[in-house]
Image (cartoon, helix red, strand yellow):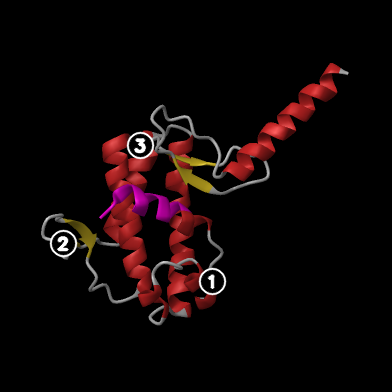
Amino acid sequence: MDFIRYAEASAALLNAELADRDDLVATLPARDWLHDQATDRDATVLRRFQRELRPVFEASDTDDVRGVIDGLNGLMEKYPITPMISDHDPSDLHLHVATRAATVSELLIGEALLGLATLVCDLGPTRLGVCAEARCTDVYVDTSPNQSRRYCSDRCSSRANVAAYRARQKSAV
């Protein structure tokens, strides 16, 4: 299991519009085997999980370490995770969330929580954030060496930099 990839996938899940099954399937382009299993109920469960997970990113964004830890622990209690050692490549043993999860939403929630919990333990509880671009509410995972990420995407970073440049030009006149 690549914990950073799962942590980043949790941010993408949180940023996704999940009105129905089709929206959920659209968030899983590299996981074709899950498409047929996805249901409208999975989308509903994941929308609720989005509302529950967002405060963890917001707490991290404001350096609220206790909020991050309590938030993740509470979610892991509510949504128990079953990790398994994967041996599909015997030379590269690693952890996966149990593939015996009954639903797509259970699998995605388990991956998100295990990825985030491991990331928080390995890199620290302030590596999650909310985009600093004023018109954006998306979240991100900061894996930069110096913990300098402030935007969810290059697009938002560019938009903010252009706005700042224009404001400087306007005030100089």
- Eye-nearest disc, 3 or 2: 2
The residue tagged 1 is: 23
Quadrant of the frame with the N terminus:
bottom left
For the C terminus, which image quadrant? top right
The answer to whether marks 1 and 2 mark residues whose Cβ atoms lie closer than 8 Å is no
Given residues 49 and 146, the one toward you in this image is 146
Predominant SS along the magenta part: helix
Residue in view at x 78 percent, y 29 percent: 166
Q: Is residue 21 above or below residue 148?
A: below
**Residue highlighted by disc 2:** 89
Residue of label 3: 125
Above/below status of 63 relative to 7: above
- Residue 73: tell me if it is visible: no
Residue at 74% x, 27% y: name it: 165
Three-letter residue code for mark 1:
Asp
For disc 3, the neighbor class at 10 Å (few under 14, some 14 to 19, many from 20) is many
Residue 132 percent across, percent down from the top left: 59, 37
* Magenta span of residues: 1-11
